[in-house]
Image: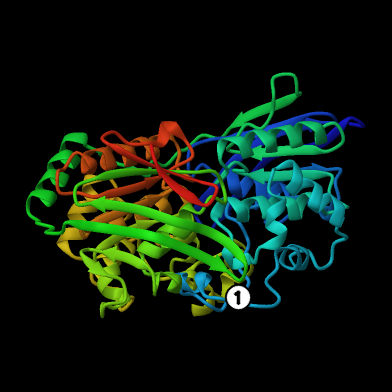
Amino acid sequence: MDNRLLKLEEVSLSFGPIILLPSVSFSLDKGQHMVIEGPSGSGKTLLAKIIAGIYPPTAGDIICTFQKSEVAYVAPQPWVDTQPDRTYFESRYEVFYGGNEVVDIAHSAHENTLVDDQKFRDFLQKMGMSYLLEKQARQLSNGESKTLQLASVFSQKSIKCYLLDKPFLGLDEAKRRNLTDYIHALSVEKTFISIGDNLFRDHVDHKIIRLPKEKQDLHHFDKNLLHREIVRRYASISHDYDVIVGMENVDVYYDELCILNGINWKVLQGEKWLVKGTNGSGKSMLMSLITADNPKAYNQNIVLFDHARGSGESIWDIKAKIGYVSPEAHMYFLKKENVHLKKILQFSDTLNDRFSSKISCGEVVESGLYERMDYSGGYISKNTRDFMACFGMDHLMNERYAYLSMGIQRILLLMRAMIKNPALLIFDEPCQGLDDEQKNLFLEAVSLICAQENSTVIYISHHLDEIPDNINKQLLLENKRAYIV
């Protein structure tokens, strides 16, 4: 036992009669690392949080030589959110001054932990992102926020064991290589448990455990049924626009910091675009100018749906024509409704509205049919029921959204974006958090949509295997400028 770092014997987690994590047993010795694999909803994140001491298991034994203060769990979603009381997604692009610098935010996230500022800066340098030190937190893209989250954790002095949940999420190819190199060097003296992504090279001693999934999330998915439904939906609508998006010499500055410079781009109805660029190249910022989330769009030469921006249209007029999914939108969506399992376990005897989430999966998808955030819930239309059935998810109609895995939540938000057959669909890293089955389902649906003549799609991804068929144009963001490739 002297060589044993961690041992789990028949550890499981339940909530009443519901089994959240079936029995798991394994051990980890000194010098070893581990990858926890499994489909979405199999309990990978729950297992990691049990190991980290965040959730107590309801059965089984854990022997761990690490103190709780020596273990760090790093969640998939970046934690940067400087004002948690502000729930509107577009608020992240409003101009803020003071107290939002990334170093302050990173250090305040670990108030009771000693932080090595030099390690923080060294990590950013190794990732090729030292420029983040000059940015404010609300200017960060998803990939930049993820990098900052990792820098904050790796700069803590007391940590001996890192549990990294989907550590590659949001990172471009070069940043993924940089992170792997950094962890490889650190693995000599630290212990790593990676959830979902294999960080380890062949010569690094590591175990792989795979969690089974006893309950299927996708039932009766019929490709032919989905194909007929998408063709029917797009045959019944007529989007009559010429220019969906037009930009001429568009600049975005925050103080003296240039994010985008001299952008010229035109998206015509029926075109399908792939937007490429490294972390921090301005992809999310560019999308925010289209989705009416960023006030920087005013006083610029921007045309949306044949109308000059600022010519009298409301943000809701614009949003009614757009279906949009991104990691940031996932994080902000109905934020105050989200349930954290820790609170459920702590307050299960006196569960009240403060810790409950009543919104169902059907209501999440249904809300996509409404132009404003004025959907009060309760009613689910036949349109929504039929659409969920095409995805094999009608059995989740009344299930609570907040209780489901990240992957299923993302699929529901994708359906929410698609259901109104908008004039423009924007998918910003839409496959983040999806397992292979879910990814294949989504790419099948988007490829079918892209095959329709009157659909217009803007798609962003760092992964070549996540790009749907029928994308026919590409825009590259590089050095703050845009290039058609």
> Where residue 297 sits in the image (x, y, percent)?
40, 69
The kind of residue tagged 1 is Gln
Q: Quadrant of the rendered structure where residue 190 is?
A: top right
> Where residue 22 sits in the image (x, y, percent)?
56, 42
Disc 1: which residue: 83
Q: Quadrant of the C terminus?
A: top left
> Where residue 479 sits in the image (x, y, percent)?
55, 47
Q: Residue furthest top?
A: 203
Q: Residue furthest left?
A: 236
**Residue 69 left/right relative to 396:** right
On screen, 9 above or below 152? above
Q: Quadrant of the N terminus?
A: top right
Closer-to-camera residue (217/18): 217
Q: Residues within 10 Å of mark 1 (few under 14, many from 20)?
A: few
Q: Secondary structure at mark 1?
A: loop
Q: Quadrant of the rendered structure where residue 310 is?
A: bottom left
**Residue 53 left/right relative to 309:** right
Q: Residue at x 19, y 52 (%)?
A: 269
**Residue 212 left/right relative to 321:** right
> Where residue 365 sits in the image (x, y, percent)?
30, 61
**Residue 113 left/right relative to 200:** right
Numbered label tally = 1
Closer-to-camera residue (318/6): 318
